[in-house]
Amino acid sequence: MPRPRKSLISLSDTPFYHCTSRCVRRAYLCGEDKLTGKSYEYRRQWVEDRLLFLADVFCVDVCAYAVMSNHTHLVLRINKQKADDLSTREIIRRWHKLFKGMLLCQRYINPVESETITDAEVKTVKSVAEVYRTRLYDISWFMRLLNEFIARQANREDDCTGHFWEGRFKSQALLDEASVAACMAYVDLNPVRAQIATTPESSAHTSIQKRINAAKSNRQPKLLLPFAGNPRNDMPDGLPFRIEDYLEMVELTGRHFHSDKKGNIADSAPSILTRVGLDRADWHIMVSGIETEFKVTVSAERLILRKKRNRQCRSA
């Protein structure tokens, strides 16, 4: 029996989640329909544009994404602290980028009309804003406003009605630093593993391509959660490893998995693997098993414990 969404997404466990959505139709979300010959490649841009727009509105950070032919992969981080720090006016302004909202809320953020609002009306506005605040760091709301938008746009273009996606998105909790890095690499390498791209930098509509293009100018993409470097006392907000380590790790992992690149992995492993206690074999098992070996949660500790039990069984 499927588990309720509230038990799958819990901030007390982790703010990081891997979310996937799959198209229900024979005709792909993107790509070319083999029966009609019509190309839907441009729809990838729909998804990417909507995703990055929502990342700018919500307090949900995008760590990685890949828009595939009939499904999407996202690695998201819930940023509750950011939501808690927003003023009532900022919350309403953000929410009004998505919905028209209450007339009273519109008056509250209008510099002229706000002076005529009574104390009772202000209290009502603040109560409504608290509801919006919780939604702005809610992954279910984020995914809903991503998938519904794409479904409506595709249905309108195809002149049809009905379901566009299989159902609600699927999610996996990423319980530790190694799980986050492994899942990001898995997502970023999806086009390479599917053989629709030969290298990470040529993988269109992916976070890895966006990060590499930005790195060429010595910067990080504005709407993706930045790499903050190795953990330290004065560490800024962001992913807890260096971008150069991550790009090297993706390159090595992609060379290992892609069928056209069977070369050996270089002798020097990225420092993140040593830091989280995984050897290279463990790492590749973890990346390749994101959707097969792990179900609801992804954890390096779980992988290590399973290996330990296997060794004990063999020695018994």
Image (cartoon, grey):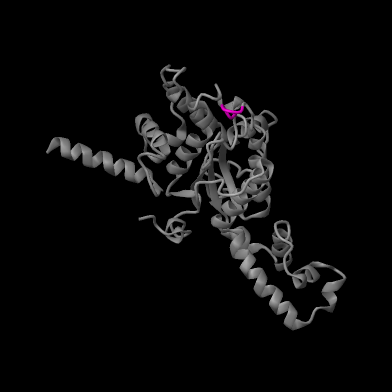
Residue at screen point 52% across, 36% down: 26
Magenta-colored segment: predominant secondary structure: loop
Nearer to me, 167 or 13: 167
Front residue of 202 and 30:
30
Magenta extent: 32-36
Image quadrant containing the N terminus: bottom left
**As drawn, 91 above or below 116:** above
Q: Is residue 294 visible?
A: yes
Left or right of 309? Residue 166 is right
Left or right placement of residue 276 versus residue 59 in this view: left
The quadrant of the rendering that contains the C terminus is: top left
Q: Quadrant of residue 69?
A: top right
Residue 79 located left or right of residue 281: right
Q: Percent x, y for residue 21?
A: 52, 45
Q: Residue at x 54, y 56 (%)?
A: 140
- In the orientation shown, which residue stands out farthest toward the right? 112
Tell whether 287 sits left or right of 164: left
Q: Is residue 185 above or below residue 127?
A: above
Determine the residue located farthest toward the left in the rendered image: 316
Judge whether residue 228 is colored magenta: no
Q: Residue 133, position in %: x, y?
A: 63, 64
Q: Is residue 277 above or below residue 124?
A: above
Image quadrant in which you'd find residue 33: top right
Task: Confirm whether residue 223 shows in the render.
Answer: no
Name the residue: 38% across, 37% down: 289
User: In the image, residue 308 lies at what x, y percent?
Assistant: 24, 40
Residue 3 on image: x %, y %: 39, 57
